[in-house]
Amino acid sequence: MTEAVIETDGLTKQYGSTVAVDDLDLTVTDDEIYGFLGPNGAGKSTTIGLLMDYVRPTAGTVRVLGADPQADVVEIHDRLGILPDRYSLYDGHTARQHLALVSNTKRASDSPEQLLDRVGLGDVIDQDIATYSQGMEQRLALAMALVGDPDLLILDEPFTGLDPHGVRTVREIVHEENERGAAVFFSSHVLGQVELVCDRVGILHRGQIVAEGTVDDLRTSADVDADASVEEIFVSITDEAVTADDRAVEGER
Ligand SMILES: Nc1ncnc2c1ncn2[C@@H]1O[C@H](COP(=O)(O)OP(=O)(O)OP(=O)(O)O)[C@@H](O)[C@H]1O
């Protein structure tokens, strides 16, 4: 029997006249790898911010790991690993020190060597992170998300800045974590990787889910060829959503 690890009901976030997340009903279960896709500005990072209680909803509810992020933030953060879109690393400190910081907060006892080996940073564990490249920083941020064997991993654009080896490493880690028993929720623009990794995807457009299912489901429902790539499916579905919006605006005139 699966349980929901993410559940939103009518979730809405408005910034002035901009509706970043619009009446979103989203469910992710404890056994799945869910890809959260959408064009720039669709509301992916805002949704993740709402799950993490970095921002507060204008309307609707959120449950993460069965708890309310506004009330049970510590409990949730103890059981969750997050790779945010903008993370802070501290120049003058090593990767080992960064992991120790997260481990202390979570009262976890992971081996920093093992975690950094997994992300390909085993050789630079005691090097000042000021010397790290963008891809190395991204690998360290991923290692920090893995501390404490989380039940849920939320990864905002985990492939950013990574070379092909790094992309493969992330894919392997996502699978390993899922096999260990963690659910994985990640946003991505790297559409080629999505089919290789995700059990299910949701496509967000102007704060609303416009398509959801397995990549095969979406291929069948979208107006594309049977062998269409995820990119072709994505473009077809989001273009269709734009056309539907334009028609609705025309209808209002
Ligand atoms: N703090 C904020 N103040 C005002 N508007 C915001 C704020 N954060 C996000 N927005 C707006 O909300 C909408 C959704 O933004 P969000 O960053 O969630 O999209 P995204 O799907 O993550 O985009 P990207 O793929 O470019 O990272 C955009 O129109 C954005 O301009």
Image (cartoon, grey):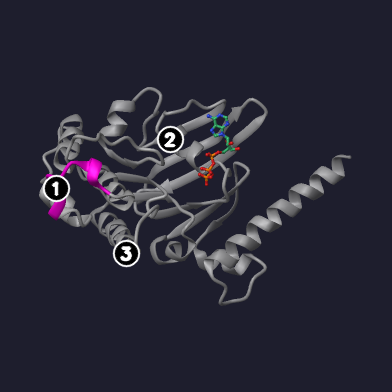
Residue 29 in the image: state x and y as whole percent. 40, 49
Query: In the image shown, does 8 or 187 lie closer to the viewer?
Result: 187
Magenta range: 123-132
Image height of 161 relative to 228, above or below:
above
- Quick one: 51 or 88, which is closer to the camera? 88
Which kind of residue does numbered mark 3 sit on? Arg
| Amino acid type for the residue under numbered disc 1 | Ile
Q: Residue furthest front?
A: 131
Marked residue nearer the N-terminal end (3 or 1): 1
Task: Verify whether residue 125 appears in magenta.
Answer: yes
Q: Quadrant of residue 60?
A: top right
Q: Which residue is mark 3?
A: 168
User: Ligand 1 lies in which image quarter?
Assistant: top right
Q: x, y (%) of residue 58?
A: 57, 25
Quarter of the C terminus within the rendering: top right
Q: Is residue 47 magenta?
A: no
Give residue 125's mark.
1
**x, y percent for residue 159:** 38, 55
For the residue labelled by badge 2, is the local secondary structure a helix, a strand or a loop?
helix
* Disc nearest the viewer among 3 and 1: 1
Q: Residues within 10 Å of mark 3 (few under 14, many from 20)?
A: some
- Mark 2 burial class by Cα count in 10 Å: few <14, some 14-19, many 20+: many
Q: Secondary structure at mark 3?
A: helix
Name the residue that disc number 2 marks: 51
